[in-house]
Amino acid sequence: MTWTIEPRPWDEPAGAALRAAQRAELDARYGTDDHEPGTPPSAADIDLFLVAIDPAGTAVGCGALRRLDPTTAEIKRMYVTPAARGSGVATAILRALESAALDRGWTTIKLETGPAQRDAMRFYEREGYHEIPLFGAYIGADLSVCYERVLAVPIR
């Protein structure tokens, strides 16, 4: 299957609907709506928000980048609808985020997921991410597991 992966405004309706679906799924997995440490992403602090659209025009996935420092970004709101899982769209979104990060000079990608998201943990590990100590707002958070991937090492 092929998708169109395109930048969209954070508050665009299709992206907002995907993020709401993700939130509902995570609330159900964790049995609470209190499972995200730190400041939730917003239009003010997201540098790039991508939405994957299937050939029928349906939004089937999304992901965002938030810059942490001059060479590091964090993946936020990576989500694929249940019907599109296993189709490769998650990998396509991830690669588009990584490419966009490199275009901006960001060579390291970090992310946070949680212990109830074993599928996400397997996905990121398969895609070359390795578990790291909790960072930033996630330090001390019982429901956080953090990962990192170095995309490129600057030549010196």
Image (tube, helix red, strand yellow):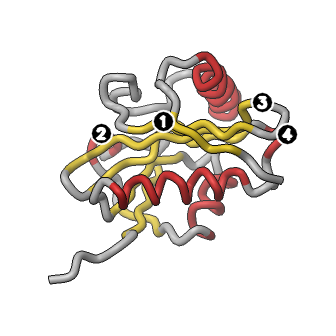
User: Who comes first in sequence, dot 3 or dot 2?
Assistant: 3
- Residue type at tag 1: Phe
User: Which labelled disc corresponds to residue 137?
Assistant: 2
Q: Is residue 83 left or right of residue 9?
A: right
Circles 3, 2 touching at the beta carbon (< 8 Å): no
- Residue type at tag 4: Ala
Residue drawn 52% across and 30% down? 8
- Cα separation, mark 1 vs mark 2, equals 21 Å
Residue 19 visible within the image: yes
Residue drawn 56% across and 21% down? 33
- Residue type at tag 3: Thr
- Cα separation, mark 4 vs mark 3, equals 11 Å
- Residue type at tag 2: Ala
- Cα separation, mark 3 vs mark 2, equals 34 Å
Q: Which residue is mark 1?
A: 49
Q: Nearer the viewer, residue 66 or 52?
A: 52
In this rendering, the label closer to the viewer, 3 or 2: 3
Q: Secondary structure at mark 1?
A: strand
The answer to whether residue 103 is above or below residue 113 is: below
User: Who comes first in sequence, dot 3 or dot 1?
Assistant: 1
